[in-house]
Image (cartoon, helix red, strand yellow):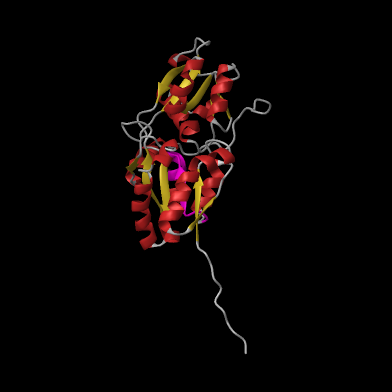
Amino acid sequence: MILFVPMLTFSEISFSPIQMETKDREYEKWKPFMVLLEKEIGEKVVFKYADRYDELINMVGNNQIHIAYLCPLTYVMTKQKNNDIHPLYAINVSPAGSKYRCVLFKSGESHFNIKNLMGKRYALVSPYATCGFLSVNYIYQKVTGKQLTDEKFAYLNSHNSVVEHVIAGDFDFGGTNSIVFEKYKVLGIEKIDETEDLPGFVIVANRKLLGEQKFNRLKSIIKNIFEYEEIKKISPYGISPATDMDYDIIRKMMPVKIPLVGNISAQGLR
C-alpha cells in the first residue's frame, strides 16, 4: 500500500527595504520590525535585499516581494509596473509628520549661488532616488528653463558619498534629502534651493500576493507594531496613513526619461 502524505509547508512573507545603508545595517535596523511582524501575523518573515534601486523596483513590481519600504519615486515607478502594490504607512521624519524636502547644496568653500547653476558638475544619489536626478532636475529646470542633462553629472549611489565629494570639491553641487542635509550641515555644506514638501518614504504591500484578508490584517498589525519601543530606531516619530494620491506630486515632477547613467565617470571617487 502506498500512503500519500500531504507535504507540510510553512508559508513565508518577504520584506525588502530600499537601500539606505549596507545590507547588514539595514537588516539590523529592520530586525525588530520583522520579529514583531512575524509574531503578530503568524508567518515567517524573510528579509530580502536589493543592492540597487532598479533591482528593488523589479523585485517588487514582478510579485517577488510581499512588503517593501520605498522612497516616493521608487513607489511611483513600482506602481507603474504593478497596480497591486498599495501604500500603507509613511514613516514620520519629525513630530510634524512624514513629509520632507530634497535639497540642492554646495560646499561652504565655494562662492556659487542659485544664479550659477549652468556649466557645473552635479553629484547625484541614483537614477531612482527621489532626491537624485528627479528633484535636482526639477530645481535646475525651474531656475534655468533647461534640463539637467545639459550639465555634467554622475551617480554616486549614496547620500553620504554625494556630501563627501561635494565637500571635497569633486563636484560643484549635490542633491540630497533634508534629513541628510541637516545631519551634515555642521560640515559646512550650504543650501542653494529645495523642493516643496514631498510625501514620505512608505511601507507598501502587494495586495494580490497577500490576499484580501491578510492585506487588511496587515494594516492594523503594522499600525500596532509602530507603537512598540523597539521600533523607535526606525521611526521615533511613528507613522502616518498613506494613499496613492499623496504621491501625485512625484508624478508631476517626473521628466520624460530619467538617465540611468551619468555623463561623467565617478570611477575612482568611491
Describe residue 37's horizontal placement relative to residue 219 as left or right: right
Q: x, y percentage for residue 12?
A: 51, 59
- Which residue: 62% across, 27% down? 264
Q: Is 67 rendered above or below residue 264? A: below
Viewer-nearest residue: 144 or 261: 261
Q: Quadrant of residue 234?
A: top left
Judged from this view, the residue extending furthest toward the bottom is: 1
Looking at the image, the residue that sits furthest to the right is 268
The image shows residue 102 at horizontal and vertical percentages of 43, 28
Q: Quadrant of the C terminus?
A: top right
Q: Which residues are magenta?
A: 64-76
Question: Residue at horizontal 52%, vertical 55%?
Answer: 62
Q: Quadrant of residue 268?
A: top right
* Quadrant position of the N terminus in the picture: bottom right
Residue 73 shows in this picture: yes
Residue 80 is situated, as x and y percent measured from the top left of the image, at 44, 49
Is 252 magenta? The answer is no
Q: Out of 197 and 265, give the one closest to the viewer.
A: 197
